[in-house]
């Protein structure tokens, strides 16, 4: 099984940077994912890492260290619309996802 | 419009009743999944199907059953609902070899 930990809540100011950490312990690893979920809506895919290092996609970047069982999602130039829950998920060898409980990010003006 | 649809949007159900949540995708994805989302617990996999005709158990399968008669449809059945099955249920699909899972809009189920 998977044990995935991420902070429950974070607050940041518009225009700032926020880093959401995720640690995991797995019985098999086949990639780490980040999803965004606005209140009352479905999760939407943000990023995928399977090799160590940083993946950048516009204002969002995701980092992975497989040896440390660690990832982070970096949100730059925060906007009000970035207020949402961010879900860290690990895929096992059978291509099934296990999700963390999610981090609720609140962006303040 | 391509994507995943779920029905109903929400439902209030008496304990002991049978209920089927419907999920249909038109992206011809091989794999489909059912999750439940509860406050503080995140998304948990109930059942999945890697291709039509096959199904598998996820993390929390007890009390639920699924079938995958064709590529597009993946219904989830609660044979005899209990209050602990009150949750938001999401269906998702993905293409083999592609990383992204696409999620439906969800069904909010309340069992009284």
Image (spheres, helix red, strand yellow):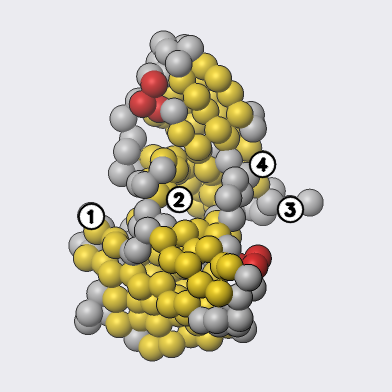
**Label 1: how many Cα within 10 Å (few below 14, some 14–19, many 20+):** few
Q: Looking at the rendered structure, which numbered label has been put on residue A1?
A: 1
Left of A60 or right of it: where is A20?
Answer: left
Mark 2 — on which chain does it sit? B
Q: Which dot, 3 or 2, sits closer to the camera?
A: 3
Residue A2 appears at what percent x and percent y?
25, 58
Q: Earlier in the sequence, mark 2 or mark 4?
A: 4
A36 lies above or below A41: below
| CB within 8 Å, label 1 to label 4 | no
**Labels 2 and 1 share a subunit:** no
- The answer to whether marks 4 and 3 sit on the same chain is yes
| Marking on residue B50 | 2
In the displayed structure image, the side of residue A86 where residue A23 appears, left or right: left
Residue occupying image coordinates x 64% and y 52%: B28
Element assignment for label 3:
loop
Q: In the orientation shown, which residue stands out farthest toward the bottom?
A: A53
Locate the N terminus of chain A by quadrant: bottom left
Q: Chain of mark 1?
A: A
Q: Quadrant of residue B65?
A: top left
Q: Position of residue A90 (x, y in %)?
A: 35, 64
Q: Horizontal and vertical percent for residue A43? A: 55, 55
Residue at which label 3 appears? B2
- Residue at image position (60%, 75%) is A14
Q: CA distance from mark 1 to mark 4?
A: 30 Å
Above or below — where is B105 with respect to B61?
below
| Chain to which the residue tagged by mark 3 belongs | B
Q: Secondary structure at mark 1?
A: loop
Establish whether labels 3 and 2 are both on one chain. yes
Residue assigned mark 4: B5
């Amino acid at each position: 099984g998977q044990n995935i930990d991420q902070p429950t809540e974070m607050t940041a100011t518009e225009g700032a940077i926020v880093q959401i950490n995720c640690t995991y312990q797995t019985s098999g690893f086949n990639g780490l994912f980040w999803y965004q979920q606005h209140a009352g809506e479905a999760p939407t895919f943000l990023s995928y890492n399977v090799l160590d290092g940083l993946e950048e996609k516009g204002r969002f970047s995701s980092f992975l260290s497989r040896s440390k069982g660690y990832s982070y999602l970096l949100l730059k130039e925060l906007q009000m619309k970035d207020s949402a829950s961010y879900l860290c998920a690990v895929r096992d060898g059978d291509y099934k996802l296990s999700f963390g409980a999610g981090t609720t990010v609140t962006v303040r003006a | 419009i391509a994507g995943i649809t779920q029905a109903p949007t929400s439902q209030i159900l008496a304990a002991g009743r049978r209920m089927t949540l419907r999920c249909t995708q038109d992206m011809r994805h091989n794999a489909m999944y059912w999750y439940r989302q509860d406050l503080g617990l995140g998304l948990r996999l109930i059942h999945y199907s890697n291709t039509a005709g096959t199904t598998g158990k996820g993390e929390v399968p007890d009390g639920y059953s699924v079938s995958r008669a064709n590529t597009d449809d993946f219904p989830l059945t609660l044979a005899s609902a209990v209050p602990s099955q009150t949750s938001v249920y999401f269906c998702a699909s993905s293409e083999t070899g592609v990383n992204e899972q696409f999620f439906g809009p969800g069904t909010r189920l309340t069992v009284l």
